[in-house]
Amino acid sequence: MRQPLVAGNWKMNGTRTAVADLIGGIKAGLGGVESAEVAVCPPFPYLAMVEDALQGTPIAWGAQNLCTEVSGAFTGEVSAAMLRDFGCRYVIVGHSERRQYYGEDNQIVARKEAVARQHHLVPILCVGETLAQREAGITEEVVADQLDAVIELSGVAAFASTVVAYEPVWAIGTGLTATPDQAQAVHAFIRGRIAEKDAAIAAGVRILYGGSMKPDNAAELLAQVDIDGGLIGGASLKAADFLGICAAANVPR
Ligand SMILES: O=C(CO)COP(=O)(O)O
């Protein structure tokens, strides 16, 4: 039985005031959510504020990135231990925006995934194809390579304590959502790829969908057997929209 997870990726958005309002709205509205786990991933400077606001609530928080290295002379970087110091449970690794704009390849992402787990953070490992890759018919190859890099570095056991997020790049921030069938097909492929190595780990790994998920399309995506929650960008910046998605996830499966 996999507990659904709805995680908000705020990306590079927010001010102190906006963060206070958003967190206040989510806390106030979340009363009814029981079966789904909810998390928010603010930009680094707001982690302390979010920790203060969410401590003692069922809402978890996490970061959007971390350094491959443990500590030392890495100007501008943030370590896994620092994220733990601010109470993070989760950290997003390998988001397509990091891969696309900051040169993170599968090997770098696999190192981040490993260092996160070594510091008792739960990585949310993002995988997914671009539109060109989908049109070229290589979606499964691309996603397999992204998963295999983690398996090669850390072994399949990594997926016993890692969440996967399938985020088709062409659906991120575009308003284009993968259809439930398109998403389910790739989710099933991901679970199958892990199952080739370990069926029990594959059965337990949570696989989130990300890419223009909104209150009005969340229920049909979340109804798919291999979709265990969502990684939400734009719609996580408005409490009402985020809460709408949380409510859709809060149904017994
Ligand atoms: O990238 C995403 C979450 O990590 C998805 O972003 P959108 O929900 O804005 O499409």
Image: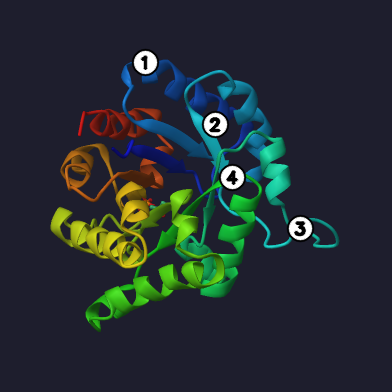
Visible residue check, residue 147: yes
The amino acid type of the residue labelled 1 equals Gly
Question: Can you tell which of label 4 and label 1 is closer to the viewer?
Answer: 4
Question: Mark 1 and mark 3 in contact (Cβ < 8 Å)?
Answer: no
Q: Which residue is mark 4?
A: 121
- Residue sitting at x 15%, y 43%: 220
Q: Which residue is mark 3?
A: 76
- Residue 82: where, in percent of width, then height? 73, 44
Visible residue check, residue 105: no
Which one is nearer the viewer's eye here, 123 or 216?
Answer: 123
Question: Can you tell which of label 3 and label 2 is closer to the viewer?
Answer: 3
The amino acid type of the residue labelled 3 equals Gly
Which one is nearer the viewer's eye here, 128 or 1?
Answer: 1
Q: Which residue is mark 2?
A: 18
Q: Which residue is mark 1?
A: 31
- Residue 12: where, in percent of width, then height? 55, 49
Mark 1 secondary-structure assignment: helix
Please tell me which of labels 2 and 4 falls first in the chain. Answer: 2
Instruction: Check disc 2: other Cα within 10 Å, few if <14, some if 14-19, many if 20+.
Output: few
- Residue 97: where, in percent of width, then height? 49, 63
Q: In which quadrant of the rendered image does the C terminus lie? A: top left
The amino acid type of the residue labelled 4 equals Leu
**Does residue 244 appear to the left or right of 110 in the view shown?**
left
